[in-house]
Structure formats: structure tokens, C-alpha cells
Image: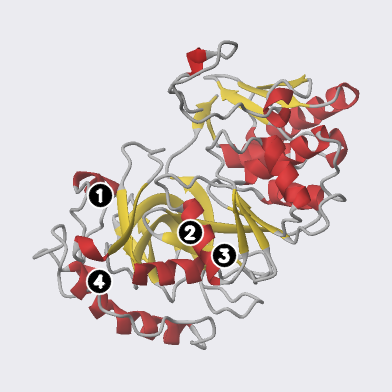
Amino acid sequence: MTQTMSRLPRLGDWADQDELVRLQQAQLPKVFEWAARSPFYRGKLPPDLSSCPLTSKQDLRDSYPFGLLAVPRADLATYHESSGTAGQPTSSYYTDEDWVDLSERYARKWIGISNTDTFLVRTPYALMITGHLAHAAARLCGATVVPGDNRSLAMPYSRVIRVMHDLSVTLTWSMPTETLLWAAAARAAGLRPEVDFPGLRALFVGGEPLSPARRQRISEIWGVPVIEEYGSTETGSLAGQCPYGQMHLWADRAVFEVYHPDTGELTADGAGQIVVTPLFRQAMPLIRYNLEDDVVISYDDCACGWKLPTVRVLGRAAFGYPVAGHKINQNDLEELVFSLPATHEVLFWRAKAGAEKLRIEIEVPEAEREQACAALRAAVQRVHAVPCVVTGVAPGTLVPQSVLTSVHDVVKPRSLFGADEDWDKALLYY
């Protein structure tokens, strides 16, 4: 059986950075003890963290499926795999004890989760951890969970809006883009996001970079706070947003470092790739795991008083496209798009980076089209100094109306049909 953990740290258990470091140092020997039981780390670990090499995503892929397992298979509670957006998926597994740590970290939302909440979970359940994590954390806090998996044909956007409205959903968990699709679907159903969902208290979001301008626009549309979270299937929640809008790393539950690829140096703060050593992970201990996300970590004080480092997540390392000698990334463009006045009603956009020219399309009503396109073109040229063509297209071009309003014919497999039924659906499940 897995060894029962001592009491997990709580916010406020340390008064300053020195006490936080002492908390980490006290737990690290246990982490090394757990890691030494896995095939991957067995016999390879130096005596202290500062001497350890990085663990890479490729290491996890090469160890598929159970090369990092540090407990008996009988002690596992769940098995997961990452989405594979950067290549072959990686395996992750957790014990019941690990899930206590995972759930508590996710539940650290400044707005709070309670037994009076109805919580819509609108991320994949499947093999990734994201839906299960929010579900477990909400149940830990006593909330009613609505499992609205966003990869299921049984939960189209029309049904999401119906459920949110009729059940008076108070909290949601999704990618930021989902919340814009909900807003469009609500309007298609004759509802006003900012008025007709009075029970809604907050939108919890994660899973993709979120610019300040888009967060502000989403908050304005729905009239509630948008609270961001950062994490991964391999680690669970790593950071959450405080009441002052800063993202704080859960440094009482993991050691965070910054890797500088140009020099190979690791530091406690600065700009580089985030490296994580979870402190309470028994099934699959990770030592200096490089998530390969570009971040900026700072230990400057925050008005919230949490005494935790802050992080700005810039996205996957080196992601971007060259245009006329300048590197263009999605986060920078998103900031410009959502800095357009709300009166232009721009929610959906796309861009293509050519060798010499950037092409952008935005959905915008005809009455606002000329002004919106001119404003965005000027902003791109001012900030990025690249040739840019901005085209306005009619609403429904990038996100078809049918996506927002349709109800899928979801059937169970069967083999016997009546004379007037379509038996081409035999054995299908969709």
C-alpha cells in the first residue's frame, strides 16, 4: 500500500520565502525516496535536487506506459494520457493519496467552491486529467457537478446553454474560447449572457494562453470574474489566479525552477522554461520535469499576501511564425484583437502568417466592418511593423450558426429496426 502522507501544506503555513523554501526542503527527501522506487529513476538519483538532470517529455514517452511507476499497480486510482498536442502523448498515473493533493490544489480558487454551487465541467473527461480534476475538486468542496464533456456529441452548445440557464449553473470550467462560443450560442437562443444567467458567479478557465484583453472581454460579456488556472495532465494544477489578477505558483506543493536553454542554467526566477518537481506525488514522482512552456517567474510581493511566486505563462517554447523578419505569436495578436472596442462585436478571428505578409480575418457585423478592420490593421502595423491584410467576414463564417444551435442525433447501437426505420444506423454510436 502507498504510505499515508502527512498533512498537506495550506495557504498561510509560511510567513515568507525563507519559510517556504524550508517547507520544500523538508519534503524533498521523501520525494527522492519515492522516485528511487521507479524503473526510470532507480539507481540514477544524485544526493540532492541541484545535482539532478532534467526529466524531459521524451523521457516520459520512452517510459510508456509504466516506466515511472513507483507504487504497486494495485495502488493506482487512475491512469491518464496527455492530449499529445506536441507529439506522442505521455502517460500519467495517480493514487488516491495523490488525488487529495490534486483536488486541493485545483480548489484553491479565490472566489471559493461550496456545496451551494452547481459546477459545469466543460473539458474532456477521456484520458486527460482536466475534466476529472475539476470534477474531483468540486465534489471535495460539496458542489453539484454537471459533467458537460466538450468532446461528446451528446453535449452540443445548444444543450450547454440550456443546462447553464435551467440549472442556474454558478461556476464553470473550460478553455477560454468555450466561453465565447457559449456567449454566441446564448444569443442565438435569444438569451443575453450578461442578464439571463443570474446565478453565474465565475468562469474558471485554463488549457490555452489567455491575453489580458481577452480575459477582460469575456468578463464583460458574462458580467463575472474570469479566473485562470495553469497546469498539465502530468502534474495537475500548478498555478492559480489571486484576487488581484496575478497567477501564483503552488510552491508549497512543488518546487519550481526556470531553465535557460541557451546556457543550460537553472534559476529560481526569471524568463525561460518552467521546470517542476512535485512534492506530494507518490505513484509517478517527477524530478525536475521540464514542461517546455515559456514562462516568467517572479518572487516580488503581491497584495494578496499569499507569499507565493507569480508566473506569466507565455506558451509552448518557440511557438510562433516568422512574417517579414518578425516572429508573430497568437497571444500577441489576441491582445490586439480583443483590444478593439466591444461595440465592434468581434469574438472570433483567425490569422495566417505568410513569409512576407500577415493575413487576418475577423467576424464582424457589416455596420462595424470597415472601422474594425482599419483599427486592427493599424494596431498590428504599430506593434509588429509587418505588412498586414485584415478582412471582415459576416458572423457565422468562422463559427457556423449550426455549430451553435444544432442538436445531434445521438443513438445507442442496435441491430433490429422497424420497416420504416433507417437501418444504416445499425451498430453505430454517434
Q: At x 70% / y 24%, what residue is drawn?
A: 402
Q: CA distance from mark 3 to mark 2?
A: 9 Å
| Residue 249, position as x, y percentages in the image | 49, 67
Q: Earlier in the sequence, mark 2 or mark 1?
A: 1
Q: CA distance from mark 2 to mark 4?
A: 28 Å
Q: Quadrant of residue 39?
A: bottom left
Residue with the mark numbered 4: 49
Identify the amino acid type marked 2.
Leu
- 80 or 218, nearer to the observer: 80
Identify the amino acid type marked 4.
Leu
Tell me how many marks there are.
Answer: 4
Residue with the mark numbered 3: 138
Dot 4, crowdedness within 10 Å: few (<14), some or many (≥20)? Answer: some
| Residue 89, position as x, y percentages in the image | 33, 41
Q: At x 68% / y 42%, what residue is drawn?
A: 160
Q: Earlier in the sequence, mark 4 or mark 1?
A: 4
Identify the amino acid type marked 1.
Leu
- 379 or 47, nearer to the observer: 47
Identify the amino acid type marked 3.
Ala
| Residue 306, position as x, y percentages in the image | 57, 78
Q: At x 49% / y 87%, what residue is drawn?
A: 13
Q: At x 64% / y 58%, what residue is drawn?
A: 119
Left or right for 143, reference 93 = right
Q: CA distance from mark 4 to mark 3?
A: 34 Å
Q: CA distance from mark 2 to mark 1?
A: 21 Å
Q: Earlier in the sequence, mark 3 or mark 2?
A: 2
Q: CA distance from mark 3 to mark 1?
A: 29 Å
Dot 1, crowdedness within 10 Å: few (<14), some or many (≥20)? Answer: many
Which of label 4 and label 3 is nearer to you? 3
Dot 3, crowdedness within 10 Å: few (<14), some or many (≥20)? Answer: many
The disc at residue 60 is 1
Residue with the mark numbered 2: 133
